[in-house]
C-alpha cells in the first residue's frame, strides 16, 4: 500500500512521543522536519544532537520503531548538517506553530541555565 507524504508525516508525528522515550532518557529529543518519498527527516536535539552515536540512534531506535509501527520500507535521516544527511527543499512539512516547538524551548531553557551556572 502506498502512503502519501502527508499520511506518513501525520503518523510519525503521532508516534514521536512514544519513540522519543529512549532519546529523552539521554537528555535529547526528536524534531520531525518533514517527509519525502517514504523518507522521514528528523533532527536529534539536546544532548543527542551532537552525540557520536546519533547515527545508531537514528537507525536502530527511530527508524526501526517507525518501520514496526508504520511501514517496513520507511527510511529515517537525521539532518545533522553533513552533505549526505541534507534535507531536500521540497519535503512535506506543514507550518509549525510556535507552541509546537516545546522541545526546542526546553532545550533552550536548559542551555540557558547551564550557561548561568557555568556548566
Image (tube, rainbow, N blue to C red):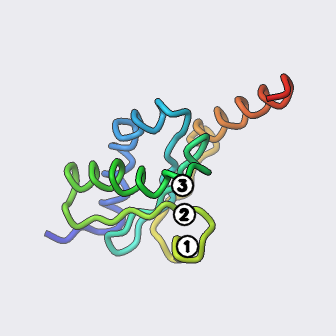
- Could you tell me which quadrant the C terminus lies in? top right
- Specify few, some or many for label 1: CA neighbours under 10 Å numbering under 14, 14-19, or 20 or more: few
Q: Do residues under tags 2 and 1 come within 8 Å of each other at their CB atoms?
A: yes
> Where is residue 36 drawn, in percent x and y?
40, 72
Q: Do residues under tags 2 and 3 come within 8 Å of each other at their CB atoms?
A: yes
Q: Which residue is mark 3?
A: 43
* Element on which disc 2 rests: loop
Q: Is residue 84 above or below residue 46?
A: below
For the point 46% across and 38% down, the residue is: 23
Give the alpha-carbon distance from disc 1 to disc 3, as whole Å. 11 Å
Q: Is residue 28 above or below residue 80?
A: above
For the point 63% across and 66% down, the residue is: 81
> Where is residue 31 drawn, in percent x and y?
52, 49
Q: Nearer the viewer, residue 117 or 38?
A: 117
- Which label belongs to residue 86? 1
Q: Is residue 111 above or below residue 67?
A: above
> Which quadrant of the figure has residue 28?
top right
Give the alpha-carbon distance from disc 2 to disc 3, as whole Å. 5 Å
Amino acid at each position: 500500500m502506498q502512503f502519501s507524504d502527508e499520511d506518513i508525516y501525520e503518523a510519525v508525528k503521532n508516534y514521536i512521543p512514544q519513540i522519543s522515550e529512549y532519546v529523552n532518557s539521554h537528555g535529547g529529543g526528536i524534531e520531525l522536519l518533514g517527509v519525502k518519498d517514504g523518507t522521514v527527516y528528523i533532527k536529534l536535539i539536546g544532548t543527542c544532537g551532537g552525540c557520536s552515536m546519533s547515527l545508531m540512534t537514528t537507525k536502530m531506535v527511530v527508524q526501526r520503531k517507525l518501520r514496526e509501527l508504520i511501514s517496513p520500507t520507511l527510511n529515517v535521516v537525521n539532518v545533522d548538517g553533513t552533505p549526505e544527511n541534507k534535507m531536500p527543499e521540497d519535503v512535506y512539512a506543514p507550518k509549525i506553530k510556535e507552541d509546537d516547538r516545546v522541545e526546542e524551548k526546553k532545550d533552550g531553557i536548559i542551555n540557558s541555565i547551564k550557561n548561568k551556572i557555568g556548566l
